[in-house]
Image (spheres, helix red, strand yellow):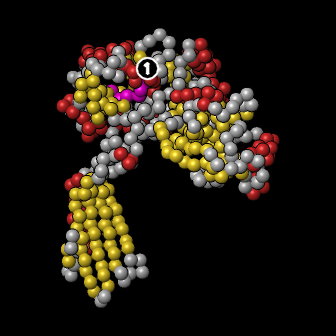
Amino acid sequence: MKLDKSLLSARNSYLEGHKDALSEDIRELPGDFKKSLSNRFFAITSPQIDSRLSGKAFHVSRKLDGHMQLVFFDGNEAFMCGRNGTVRSGLGVLDKIASTLKAKKVNSFIGAGELYIRKDGRCRVYDVTAALGEKGDADSLDIAFFDILELDGASFRGVYYNETYPKLHELLPQNTVETKIVTSIAQVKEIYENWVTVEKSEGIVVRTEDGRISKVKPEISLDAVIIGFAEGINEKRGRVKSFLFAFRRGDNYQVAGKVGNIPESEREGWFTRLSELKTESLWIETDNEGIAFQFVSPEIVIEVKCNDIMTETSTGLPLMNPIVSYGEQWKLEYSIPGAKFINLVFERERTDKTPVEDDIGPSQYENLVEVASEYKPVSEYPASEILRREVYRKTAAGKIMVQKFMVWETHKNDIDKRFPAFVFHYTDFSSGRAEPLKKEIRISSSKDQIMEIADSFIAENVKKGWEKVG
């Protein structure tokens, strides 16, 4: 567990840099932890508490609207890294945590917490972003820990929360998320009422004895326009299966989601009505079962509800929404950082609304969450660099044979985890084969390993009679 401060730059009153400044043993931990945590969360609404929660003991924590961070303490200092790979050191709150852990004789610690703003009223995620900015008040930042990953070299993964929480509170009593331990569903509902309904917190997080984690938040209402519908199949033909809806963004439309829980008694009527609005589209979109949407002119406004909004993937990349234009037909223009709405339900038609930005604009959700403002499309990523290229040619009985071996470094893996660091590509062409062209690809995070792979392929495939031509 090490931090190379020489790779950090001064920003505001602290140091900031990329995850490359972390030693390899912890470099990918923030992203991996966030992905694991997301897979364990169940998002529910307050009316579902009775039906979705069960047990005899519950840890109920106040949900804070901030930036999730992993905090590392190496026995001397504390530093942190978010799932997007941004490393920070030198913040006042980190110095305070380091002092507390030193006083408790802790040798090393890795914990997960929410970076938030100490303020009257509810902290919003964009308040944290502002505080971290060049002119922000970084001293107003605080951290509320909710989990321990490692303590003095011992893993806390898989440890039940009735052991983790007391240890957190023992080590960092001033920096542990506000939590109440209760024994009934009625008490959980009472806490939700006080913290969320009355005090306007973002929500609550409920951990049960069996390790399940439920995020309970208020329903969020959104108004949008129907731009397409999917028709049912077989005996459900002639009925609407689902809607495709969008927000108005300037002269264009931001495609926002698909919703299908339309009352059965209304599906046939919706089909008749929307069929009269059908129009052409140069863009194709399908529902969750692969049925193509039939596009309509953007006239009918509906209300949908969700219980959570995501703006990033599990690896910290922005979730992208298509931007489409409508004239004589629908056309895909480009994509922008947007949102995914969790547990969508169709509520009703809004006859009091019109498809203009004031009524159905993206500000409905942008005022609630932080959307990526800086996004670099793949076309602007660094260019790959060819590290090795060897071409061999052979002629026999009038047949031409070519083998090409290439190795390149992508220079993209640090900004987008979809890309490997190094790629080996093998091309095998023979004019006399039934399948003339064959290809193989290998990837690696190590330059030495990818070169060894290339050496092995060349040794195995280049025998007597092959001439090197490139």
Is residue 67 placed above or below 374 in the rendered structure? above
Task: Residue 366 in the image: state x and y as whole percent.
Answer: 52, 28
Q: Which residue is mark 1?
A: 127
- Camera sees residue 222: no
Residue found farthest to the front: 328
Q: Quadrant of the N terminus?
A: top left
Which segment did they paint magenta? Answer: 66-71
Picture coordinates of residue 463 (x, y %)?
A: 22, 77
For the point 30% across and 57% down, the residue is 423
Q: Is residue 188 left or right of residue 29?
A: right
Q: Amino acid at mark 1?
A: Asp
In the displayed structure, 362 sits above or below 201; it is below
Outermost top residue: 120
Kindly report the secondary structure that dominates the magenta region of the rendered protein. strand
Q: Answer yes or no: is residue 297 visible.
A: yes
Q: Position of residue 88 (x, y in %)?
A: 29, 27
Across and down, in percent, residue 160 comes to 45, 30
